[in-house]
Image (tube, rainbow, N blue to C red):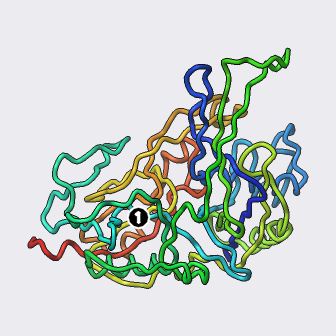
């Protein structure tokens, strides 16, 4: 079936809290993190269920037939398949993606350098021990010794991602990415600074007793909110799991089209976003088909899938957590914290061509994600498979 892209345009500041709870005298700051895929999976399902006439106090939400099969209920997620979210700029008829910066791309003061695995066995990096990422004790892959790493956070545009993919395939340790105020205005820059599209604001309040409405001076709290620049939002691809089915596809198509320009709750109580529907995904044909003896997986959303036989991994480990608001497949209450690889992490595979790795990862049954409530179906583990060449300055 065709995949639709939903563009969530924030109408106000948004709050995407991390896993830490408020505790008097201890944790009084709620930071916002890049929204997890489950945020959009839940928001979209809730909007579709409400429009389908769901009764959340009834078994199976009171739905039958196609609505029940596609949208699911409290214990079954249905057949929705999401990919994302990714930051995007609304260009009218198209969306321009802004992708998480890959951790093997080193930003220096005046240039860019790739972290390339050395050709000999036993490359350094971060290794997966079954549950967490453990630091490799050997030396890191060589990068340029000169220049000071940038502390600023950046995002790759589609053009920058294509250049990154070509440099990786050729084994180019250094390459250039273009950016200027003029190219930014035209949407032609290869990368953008995060602060130019996203501003973080802090708001402070006092907690009140629910019964007496008396302010508890020990519960001063601060919430970090996100404000996106006008025209910036989140892109999420939506399709169906399983084999193509024309009846289910038509139901989803009509349900999604009914949400066009619809406003739904997103990013905190009282905050909203407007949905626009695009019938062609900006992820389509994003990377040119290049073959190489080796390939790597660039994570575009957080993943709980163990790297398995990956020969090297570079990236950042994060904790996923939250609260189950009702008992069902998972018990009601706080979820156990789970280790995951953050978006931007890169997994390297030796002697594995792109087409072979793409097929292998497509067949991975993410049982850990299903068990913990972070399934691929909700958008976790979205990745780009790219070719790479080992460090050409090292002899195998």
Which residue carries the number 1 mark? 102
Q: Is label 1 in a helix, a strand or a loop?
A: loop
Q: Who's the residue at 45% across and 45% down the image?
A: 318
Which image quarter: residue 82?
Answer: bottom right
186 lies left or right of 301: right
Taking the image as shown, residue 121 lies to the left or right of residue 93, namely left
Residue 118 location in percent, x, y? 17, 66
* Closer-to-camera residue (189/16): 189
Say few, some or many: other residues with alpha carbon within 10 Å of mark 1 (under 14 / 14 to 19 / 20 or more). Answer: many
Q: Residue at x 61, y 80 (%)?
A: 185
How far across and how far down the image is residue 342, in percent?
A: 46, 52
Q: Please, is residue 105 above or below residue 218 in the view?
A: below
- In the rendered image of this protein, does residue 140 appear above or below residue 90? above
The one nearer the camera, 55 or 102, is 102
Task: Out of 142 and 203, give the one closest to the viewer.
Answer: 203
**Quadrant showing the N terminus:** bottom right
User: x and y percent of residue 182 in the render?
Assistant: 56, 83
Image height check: is 109 above or below 71? below
Q: Residue at x 71, y 71 (%)?
A: 245
Judging depth in this view, the residue of 128 and 395 nearest the camera is: 395
Picture coordinates of residue 170, whole percent (x, y): 28, 82
Q: Quadrant of the C terminus?
A: bottom left
Q: List the single residue furthest toward the front.
A: 181
Which residue is situated farthest in the right direction here? 53
Instruction: Give the tally of numbered discs.
Output: 1
């Amino acid at each position: 079936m065709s995949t639709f892209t939903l563009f969530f345009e924030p109408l106000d500041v948004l709050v995407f809290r991390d896993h830490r709870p408020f505790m008097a005298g201890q944790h009084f700051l709620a930071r916002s993190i890049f929204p997890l895929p489950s945020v959009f999976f839940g928001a979209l399902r809730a909007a579709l269920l409400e429009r389908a006439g769901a009764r959340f106090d009834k078994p199976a939400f009171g739905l039958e037939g196609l609505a029940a099969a596609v949208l699911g209920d409290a214990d079954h997620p249905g057949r929705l398949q999401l990919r994302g979210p990714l930051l995007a700029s609304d260009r009218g008829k198209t969306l321009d993606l802004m992708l998480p910066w890959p951790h093997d791309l080193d930003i220096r003061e005046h240039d860019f350098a790739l972290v390339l695995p050395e050709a000999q066995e036993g490359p350094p990096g971060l290794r997966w021990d079954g549950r967490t990422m453990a630091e490799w004790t050997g030396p890191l892959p060589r990068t340029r010794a000169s220049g000071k790493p940038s502390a600023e956070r950046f995002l790759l545009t589609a053009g920058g991602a294509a250049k990154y993919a070509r440099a990786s395939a050729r084994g180019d340790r250094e390459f250039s990415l273009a950016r200027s105020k003029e190219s930014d205005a035209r949407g032609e820059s290869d990368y953008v600074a995060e602060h130019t599209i996203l501003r973080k604001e802090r708001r402070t309040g006092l907690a009140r007793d629910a019964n007496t409405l008396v302010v508890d001076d020990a519960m001063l709290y601060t919430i970090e909110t996100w404000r996106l620049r006008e025209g910036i939002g989140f892109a999420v691809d939506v399709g169906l799991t399983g084999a193509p089915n024309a009846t289910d596809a038509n139901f989803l198509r009509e349900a999604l089209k009914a949400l066009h320009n619809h406003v739904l709750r997103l990013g905190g109580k009282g905050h909203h976003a407007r949905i626009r529907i695009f019938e062609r995904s900006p992820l389509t044909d994003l990377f040119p088909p290049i073959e190489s003896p080796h390939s790597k997986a660039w994570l575009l959303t957080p993943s709980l899938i163990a790297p398995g036989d990956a020969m090297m991994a570079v990236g950042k480990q994060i904790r996923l957590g939250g609260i189950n608001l009702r008992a069902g497949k998972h018990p009601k209450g706080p979820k156990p914290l789970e280790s995951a690889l953050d978006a931007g992490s890169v997994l390297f595979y030796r002697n594995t061509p792109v087409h072979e790795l793409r097929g292998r990862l497509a067949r991975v049954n993410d049982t850990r994600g299903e068990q913990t409530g972070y399934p691929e179906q909700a958008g976790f583990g979205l990745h780009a498979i790219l070719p790479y060449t080992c460090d050409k300055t090292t002899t195998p």
